C-alpha cells in the first residue's frame, strides 16, 4: 500500500462558489443585465410581491424571472400569467441555489435579453444566505405574521441583504408585530439595510420599492 | 438537508484537490467548522457517511472536524469577545455596534490520502 500523505488544504468550502459568482457578475456587467436575488421564508409573499413589482416595471424595462423551487411550477405559472418571461429551476431537493445553478438558469433564459433578471430563491432563511448567486443585490422579505424577532434568530440573511421588504403590513392590527423593534434589530445586524414596509395585497409601498429597484438597475447599466 | 448540500461542496473540493495531487484514495478529511456557520457538525458527519458510499474516491473515508470559536469585535470599545455566550451586545461596554470577526467559516483543513 502506498504511503499515506497529509495534504494541507486550508480552503473555504465556499471558495469555488464565490469564484463562480464573481464570474457571473463580470459577465452580467458586459451584458448590462442586473440580477436580483430574492430570498425569504415560505409563504412570506415573494410571488405576490413579484407580480405587483413586475406589473409596475414591465412596461419600462425587459424583465425575466428565474423561479427556484425544490419541486412544482406553481410560482412560474403565476408569473407567466401576467405575461412576464419566466423559467422554473428545480434544485432537486437542495435547500438553496448556488452560483452554478444560477448560471444554468441565466443561460437558459438568455440573460443578455433582459435589463433585470429576478431570481426567486428557495423559500428558506438559512441556507440561501450562505451562497453567493452572482447577484448584484440581495433582497429579502419578512412578513408580519412571521414576527419581529427574525433578525435575532436568522442573523446571517439580514447581514447579506441590501434591502428588507416587510410584507403584509395590512394585517399589522391583528399581530403583535413591533415595527420599531424589527427596524432596530435589522439595523443592528446590518446598518446599511434599506427597509421597505409594503402590502403586496393592497399595493401599499410598492411604488417606493420599485423606485429603489429602478435606481439599482440604472446604476448597474451606466 | 442543508448538511447534505454542504457535503456535496466538500466532496467536489476534495475531488479537485485529489486530481491535482494524484490521489487515489482518501482516508480522512478534516474540516474546521465555525461555531456560527449554521452547520450542525454531527449531522454533517452523518450526511458524509451516507454520501461516501456513492463516491468511489471517498468510500470508507472519515470526516472529522475541529471547531472555530466565534469571536465578535466591538466597534466602539475595540474589545473582542466570544460570540456564543454574549451574542450581539458587547459585554464590556454594552454597545450593539459589533461585528463578527470569525466563526462563520467552513474550511477544509487537511486531507489524509494516498
Image (cartoon, coloured by chain):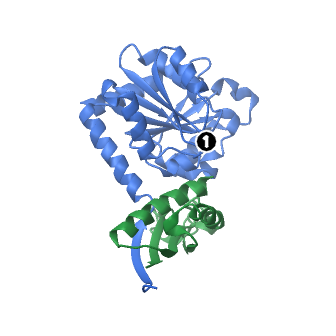
Chain colours: A blue, B green
**Closer to the camera, A136 or A8?**
A8
Closer to us: B54 or B32: B54
Which residue is the site of mark 1? A182
Q: Is the residue B96 above or below the residue A68 in the image?
A: below
Instruction: Where is residue A4? Give x, y as percent.
Output: 45, 84
Element at badge 1?
A: helix
Front residue of B80 and A97: A97
- Number of numbered labels in the structure image: 1
A168 left or right, relative to B67:
right
Q: Is residue B87 above or below residue A124?
A: below
Q: Is residue A212 left or right of residue A202?
A: left
Q: Residue at x 47, y 24 (%)?
A: A86
* Residue A89 in the image: above or below residue A74: below
The picture places residue B34, in percent across and down from the top left corner, at 53, 67
In the picture as drawn, the residue positioned furthest to the front comes out as A1
Residue B50 image offset from top left, x and y in percent = 63, 62
Give residue A195's position: percent from left, percent from top. Answer: 51, 35
B17 w.r.t. A92: above or below: below
Identify the residue at image location x=40%, y=69%: B18
Residue at 64 percent of width and 27 percent of height: A168
Q: Quadrant of residue A31?
A: top left
Chain letter behind tag 1: A
* Label 1 crowd (10 A; few <14 / some 14-19 / many >=20): many
Quadrant of image for the C terminus of chain A = top left
Amino acid at each position: 500500500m502506498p504511503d499515506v500523505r497529509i495534504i494541507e488544504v486550508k480552503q473555504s468550502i465556499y471558495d469555488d462558489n464565490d469564484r463562480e459568482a464573481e464570474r457571473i457578475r463580470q459577465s452580467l456587467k458586459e451584458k448590462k443585465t442586473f440580477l436580483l436575488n430574492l430570498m425569504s421564508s415560505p409563504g412570506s409573499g415573494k410571488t405576490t410581491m413579484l407580480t405587483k413589482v413586475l406589473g409596475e416595471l414591465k412596461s419600462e424595462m425587459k424583465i425575466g424571472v428565474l423561479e427556484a423551487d425544490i419541486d412544482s411550477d406553481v410560482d412560474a405559472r403565476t408569473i407567466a400569467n401576467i405575461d412576464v418571461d419566466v423559467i422554473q429551476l428545480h434544485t432537486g431537493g437542495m435547500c438553496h441555489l448556488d452560483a452554478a445553478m444560477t448560471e444554468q438558469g441565466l443561460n437558459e433564459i438568455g440573460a443578455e435579453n433582459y435589463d433585470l433578471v429576478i431570481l426567486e430563491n428557495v423559500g428558506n432563511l438559512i441556507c440561501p444566505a450562505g451562497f453567493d448567486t452572482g447577484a448584484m443585490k440581495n433582497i429579502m422579505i419578512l412578513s408580519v405574521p412571521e414576527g419581529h424577532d427574525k433578525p435575532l434568530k436568522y442573523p446571517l440573511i439580514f447581514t447579506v441583504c441590501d434591502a428588507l421588504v416587510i410584507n403584509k403590513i395590512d394585517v399589522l392590527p391583528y399581530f403583535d408585530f413591533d415595527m420599531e423593534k424589527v427596524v432596530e434589530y435589522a439595523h443592528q445586524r446590518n446598518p446599511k439595510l434599506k427597509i421597505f414596509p409594503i402590502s403586496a395585497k393592497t399595493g401599499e409601498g410598492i411604488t417606493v420599492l420599485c423606485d429603489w429597484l429602478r435606481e439599482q438597475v440604472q446604476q448597474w447599466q451606466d | 438537508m442543508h448538511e447534505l448540500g454542504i457535503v456535496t461542496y466538500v466532496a467536489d473540493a476534495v475531488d479537485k484537490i485529489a486530481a491535482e495531487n494524484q490521489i487515489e484514495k482518501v482516508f480522512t478529511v478534516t474540516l474546521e467548522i465555525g461555531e456560527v456557520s449554521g452547520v450542525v457538525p454531527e449531522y454533517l458527519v452523518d450526511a458524509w457517511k451516507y454520501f461516501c458510499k456513492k463516491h468511489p474516491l471517498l468510500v470508507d473515508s472519515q470526516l472529522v472536524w475541529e471547531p472555530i470559536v466565534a469571536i465578535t469585535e466591538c466597534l466602539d470599545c475595540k474589545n473582542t469577545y466570544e460570540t456564543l455566550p454574549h451574542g450581539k451586545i458587547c459585554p464590556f461596554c454594552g454597545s450593539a455596534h459589533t461585528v463578527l470577526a470569525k466563526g462563520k467559516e467552513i474550511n477544509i483543513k487537511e486531507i489524509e490520502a494516498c
